[in-house]
Image (cartoon, rainbow, N blue to C red):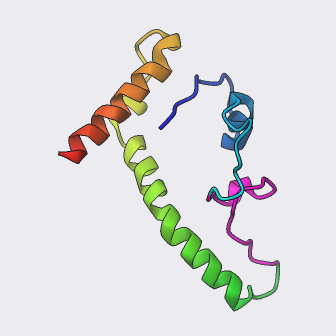
Amino acid sequence: MWVSEPFECRRHDFHCLKRSGILEGRDTTSWLADKGYIGSDMLTPFRKPRKREQPRWQKGYNFRHNKIRVVVERAIAHLTTWRILHTDYRRPYNTFATTITAVIGLYFFARSE
């Protein structure tokens, strides 16, 4: 589990992921990602071709891919419903990564009991 320092301005997740340096020296070819990461070396679902039906094998691959990723998407959805993420962060800006890491750790600790 890892949380980067916050980035100023609005950027796509992949841009921030590359800038964070966490990918350096890591083999990401077996990482599952969503369609926003198409073009990286991560495993992503297939896009539906324009004005054509998607082949059945691609639909099957996407189904299996999304069946695994749904756990991640639910966790992200759960985090975004937390009230602290809906309001302005009221602590010093440079403590955000430490605070959110502690909150996530406490959440998973509470769920493990």
Image quadrant holding the C terminus, namely top left
Q: Let me know if residue 41 is in the magenta part.
A: yes
Where is residue 100 drawn, in percent x and y? 42, 27
Write the residue at 40% across / 21% down. Answer: 99
- The front one of 36 and 32 is 32
- In the image: residue 2, left or right of residue 87: right
Residue 73 % position (x, y): 48, 56
* 1, 60: nearer the viewer: 1
**Residue at point 72% right, 72% down?**
46
Establish if 98 lies above or below 33. Answer: above
x and y, in percent, of residue 50 in the image: 82, 78
Q: Quadrant of residue 54?
A: bottom right
Instruction: Judge whether residue 11 can be spotted in this image.
Output: no
Q: What residue is rendered at 22% in x and 40% in y?
A: 110
How many marks do you count on the picture? Answer: 0
Magenta range is 32-49
- Relative placement, left or right, of 31 versus 81 is right
Q: Is residue 106 magenta?
A: no
Residue 53: quarter of image: bottom right
Q: Is residue 75 positioned above or below 15 on the image?
A: below
Query: Which residue is at 46% across, 9% downward?
Result: 92
Q: Residue furthest left?
A: 113
Is residue 110 visible from the viewing direction of this image? yes
